Structures are given as C-alpha cells and as structure tokens.
Image: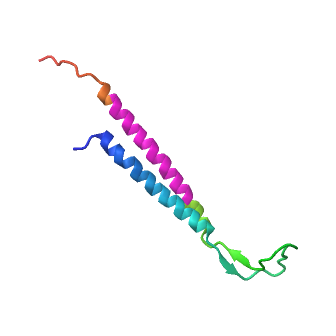
Amino acid sequence: MRSPRELVAWGRPAGLVAAAVGLIDGIWMIARRHPADCPDGHVFGPNETDFNCYVHPMAHQGVAVVAFAVLFAVLVLLAASAVDLLAQSADDVKPTASTP
C-alpha cells in the first residue's frame, strides 16, 4: 500500500490541474459573447466604431465555475497539507516498548 506522502505527491498536482482546467473553462464561459439585437433607445458613444450589441449568455455559470474551481484548489491544498502534516507527525512518534 502506498504511503500517505506518496498519495499527496501525486494527488496534489492532479487536483490542482483539475482546478486549473475548471478555472480556464469558467473564464472561457465568461468571455464568450454573441451578437444580439440592441434594445430600443440604445445610444452609442461618439467614438464608437462597432455598432453591434453583444450578450454573454454563459457569464453567470462561468462565474460559478470559476468560484468552484478556486474553492476546489483551496480544498486540495488544505487537504494535502493536512495529510502531509499528519504523516509527518506519525513519523515523529517514537514507538514505546510495551510491557507483557
């Protein structure tokens, strides 16, 4: 069986990669936009060159994905640190002689 430190050694990077993928996906969802009809009465600025209106239909979900990705990364780091600390403290415990 693998030691807890070996599990942390591959689990921490795997969890952080998964969180990074979620972060990139969430940012991509926020950034995507689609042309839409401008609402009545929409006024463009005097220096406008692009007279299109855009909507970001997945922005709310993207923000949620980014938030979950950041929280997942924090959870991975805290859990890995806790397991590493517990493994270190278990290694530091000296076995005592038991009496028959």
Does residue 3 sit above or below 99 in this rendering?
below
55 with respect to 67 (left or right): right
Residue most toward the right?
A: 46
- Image point (25%, 43%), residue name: 2
Q: How many marks?
A: 0
Q: Quadrant of the C terminus?
A: top left
Residue placed most toward the observer, 28 or 94: 28
Query: What secondary structure is the stretch in magenta mostly built from?
Result: helix
Q: Residue visible at 62% across and 73% down?
A: 57
| Place of residue 3 in the rendered image (x, y in percent of width and height, measured from the top left) | 27, 40
Q: In the rendered view, tell whether residue 54 sits above or below residue 71.
A: below
Q: Which of the 4 image quadrants contains residue 54?
A: bottom right
Q: Is residue 91 above or below residue 18?
A: above
Q: Residue at x 52, y 56 (%)?
A: 68
Q: Is residue 60 left or right of residue 18?
A: right
Please state the horizontal and vertical placement of residue 8, each as a whole percent of the image.
35, 44
Residue 63 quadrant: bottom right
Residue 79 among magenta residues:
yes
Could you say which quadrant of the image residue 43 lies in? Answer: bottom right
Provide the residue span drawn in magenta.
66-89
- Asked if 5 appears above or below 28 in the picture, the reply is above
